[in-house]
Image: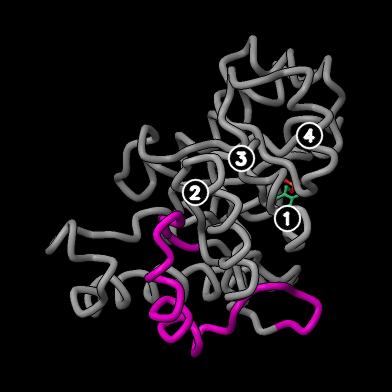
Amino acid sequence: MISDNLKSVTQRIVSSCEKIGRSEKDITLVCVTKEASIAEIEEVLRLGVTDIGENRTRDALLKYRAIGDRVKWHLVGHLQTNKAKDAVRIFSLIHSVDSERLVGQIDKESKKINKVQDVLIQVNISREESKFGTSPENVLEFLKAISLYPNIKIRGFMTIAPEAENPEIVRQCFRELRELKDELNSVLPGLPSTKAGAGKTQYSILSMGMTSDFEVAIEEGSNMVRIGRAIFSG
Ligand SMILES: *Cc1c(COP(=O)(O)O)cnc(C)c1O
């Protein structure tokens, strides 16, 4: 039952927040609908979900045509440069930016529709070859390179933890991204893109945590969890 599942996920988010003294209001639940039908998406919307995540632009486009702008659309999966044109028309937040070529394309397509596209940098904290994302060592250089594109706004960072049996490995991965975000926020005043908001924290979003690890992610500072199976399976 989707409604029971959603209630249970929400309760687990609340408990994780209580455990570390945070407010659940700080956490955005992105309901990942890649396995869900239009009817199931309609159901979660009725239950109060405000943010929907898809991992492919082409699938999102079909669902977007049926659902429209009643929700915020998130691209959580990899984006190919040739899909940037569709992506900027649909998504409020693109979680998976990891190359300057892609940034250039998103910037160009956003400009055409007079939009400043919010994006997250995907960081491959676990350094698994199978994963997309920029390496942690390269993030600062990457940010410097892309901070001059006017139609892109970098809001924070996203990572996917390894499927490790040892939960401490997963925890370490989330902790590293949070530390990286804090570090980058402290060195940022030197970057051109922060001139407008001098002194303010620019990178605020940490998108981390899925069905198998969202509680650990919240404990380690996540403020955006991407959850599919726990809501739509079983
Ligand atoms: C599918 C997916 C999710 C959701 O995963 P679940 O295990 O179903 O909760 C989150 N993030 C990304 C990038 C995904 O592709």
Looking at the image, can residue 23 be seen?
A: yes
Q: Is mark 4 within 8 Å of ligand 1?
A: no
Q: Residues within 10 Å of mark 3 (few under 14, many from 20)?
A: many
Q: Is mark 1 within 8 Å of ligand 1?
A: yes
Residue type, numbered disc 1: Gly
Q: Is residue 36 above or below residue 57?
A: above
Judged from the image, the secondary structure of the residue bearing numbered disc 4 is helix
Mark sitting earlier along the chain (1/2): 1
Mark sitting earlier along the chain (4/2): 4
Q: Residues within 10 Å of mark 2 (few under 14, many from 20)?
A: many
Residue 43 falls within the magenta-colored stretch: no
Q: Quadrant of residue 201?
A: bottom left
Judged from the image, the secondary structure of the residue bearing numbered disc 1 is loop
Q: Which mark is residue 77?
A: 1
Q: Nearer the viewer, residue 16 or 157?
A: 157
Identify the residue at image location x=86%, y=36%. 35
Judged from the image, the secondary structure of the residue bearing numbered disc 2 is strand
Q: Is mark 2 within 8 Å of ligand 1?
A: no
Determine which residue is flagged by label 2.
Answer: 117
Q: Nearer the viewer, residue 159 or 148?
A: 148
The residue stretch that appears in magenta: 128-157
Give the spatial CA distance, label 4 vs label 1: 14 Å
